[in-house]
Amino acid sequence: MNPINPANHDEASVAAGRVRIFDTTLRDGEQAPGFSMDRRAKLRMAQALEALGVDILEAGFPQASPDDFAAVAEISRSLKTTTVCGLARCQSGDIDAAGRALEAARHSRIHVFLSTSPLHREHKLGMSKAQVLDTAVAGVQRALSLCHEVEFSAEDALRTEPEFLVEVFSAAVAAGATTLNAPDTVGYTTPSEIIELFEYLRRHVKGAEKVIFSSHCHDDLGMAVANSLAAVSAGARQVECTINGIGERAGNAALEEIVMALKVRAPHFGVDTRIDTRKLFPTSRLLSQLTTQPVQRNKAIVGDNAFAHEAGIHQHGMLKHRGTYEIMRPQDVGIAETRLVLGKHSGRAALRQRLQVLGHTPDEAAMDAIFARFKTLADKKREIHDEDLEAIALGQDPDATGPWRLIQLNTATHLGGAAASVKLAHDDGREAAEAAIGDGPVDAVLRAIERATGNDLELTDFNVRAVSEGGDAQGHALLTARHAKRDWRGHGLSTDIVEATALAALAIVNRIERQTPAATPVAIAHL
């Protein structure tokens, strides 16, 4: 076993003013339906979490499966500064498996847990209080012989008799546990109740001054973050959380929300974390990419709307002073800038500001006409993008189609890639046919359309969703691509998702061509 890293074992500094961030994205988060990751994805996520600055990373439940064991072992070998943790029931097989998986870790922790509530003791364990006590002590002692430090969790602690919880925690401390976790396993408690419990535990647990109390809250009633922050207010100096709040059922407390609450309201809480908040947004997006699960637009801190403003009153205030409607800077969480989203609620000030960014400085008379066309379009569309504004400013129809139309599309996939061929027709009578290969059918289709139309497109975002149900369900493809240092968007709708993608790419090409009429036609292949 490697020697303990003093930087990770400075309990005094933690107790004085720092909250440890215990990330369980790869354990509690990953075991939730829809969020499974393979070993390679887990390792990539673990490395991102270490770069983010998490203190402890719960890499998995080694006894759960051979793959989980292998993932924990690989992460243990890879991480350099973050404590790697493995979960185990208070059973010798679980604990031994965790110990073996963590052997290569520079700093290791085994997280043993045992149910303590009356409901769990009777219906899940079939144990008396005395048996629970004995099992907890034996589990902590066995784990301590296999790792650098041990955390003990009393599962369903918030529905456990406080006096018995004190008894169990006191026994765990005597056995060698250095972190005590009182989880709200079913998301049942409230902030006032959790404050009362943590204050009670800190007063009555024997050896409380030598250990760190931890909070692990679930979001069944939507209070996981509020309860976690309440626990911090009551003296908890470790918070267990996940990126994007993923986890069992309604999820866990969201790491990004807890960290930014402690940062923005630092005078109130009086504690900080080691998290590099500028990496919160990239880490959130990485998890979304690895699990193929999108982040909801209105998600706090990292959602698309977190730093976006559409209402005219808000936009006018933001243009005057950022602090009118933002309590933190988007750059602090890794987002490039605030977005003033143009839609039906937007006003003239935001429209004029965006037109100026795009190089248009209309006089008042022209602005009146542009604003009228903008409002008409905004009533039909959820969001107005730069290419729509360009068309409005140039007196063009933002909803125009063409000049390119899709006549034929063929794709074929093979091991390691895909091929696509397209045939296009132009309003001026030309036809173009091209073929290309790519990493997958979407990439191949995009490359073929690039070649046929002579436009270079760098795909920056791709989103697909079903808009109806059944075997003939329609799919909606939304593409964002960079061309000539600008982002262009297009969407397509079809029962064939590859065709929807082709239509979305063609929409981008058509917008580019309509707004650059002086472009020289490219050489094309005629059929």
Image (cartoon, rainbow, N blue to C red):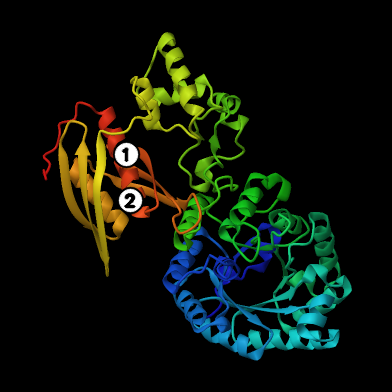
Q: Residue furthest bottom?
A: 92
Mark 1 or 2: the one toward you? 2
Q: Is residue 43 left or right of residue 262?
A: left
Upstream in the sequence, badge 1 or badge 2? 2
Viewer-nearest residue: 325 or 309: 309
Q: Nearer the viewer, residue 3 or 230?
A: 230
How far from the left and from the top, in percent, is residue 248? 64, 66
Disc 2 is placed on an element classified as: helix
Tally of marks: 2
Q: Position of residue 270 (x, y in %)?
A: 70, 50
- Location of residue 190 with respect to 364 vertically, above or below: below
User: Which one is nearer the viewer's eye here, 450 or 216?
Assistant: 450
C-alpha gap between disc 1 and disc 2: 14 Å
Q: Secondary structure at mark 1?
A: helix
At 21% across and 32% down in the image, what residue appears? Answer: 427
Q: Residue at x 42, y 33 (%)?
A: 385
Q: Name the quarter where the C terminus is drawn.
A: top left
Specify the amino acid type for callout 1.
Ile
Residue 508 is marked as 1
Residue 358 visible within the image: no
**Compared to 143, does 228 lie above or below?**
above
Neighbor class of circle 2 (other Cα within 10 Å; few <14, some 14-19, many 20+) is: many
Picture coordinates of residue 325, whole percent (x, y): 61, 32
User: Which residue type carries mark 2?
Assistant: Glu
Going 84% across and 77% down the picture, which residue do you hit?
118
- Residue 410 circle label: none
Q: Position of residue 209 (x, y in %)?
A: 77, 69
| Residue drawn 85% across the image and 84% down it | 129
Q: Which residue is mark 2?
A: 499
Decide if residue 365 is on the left or right side of residue 267. left
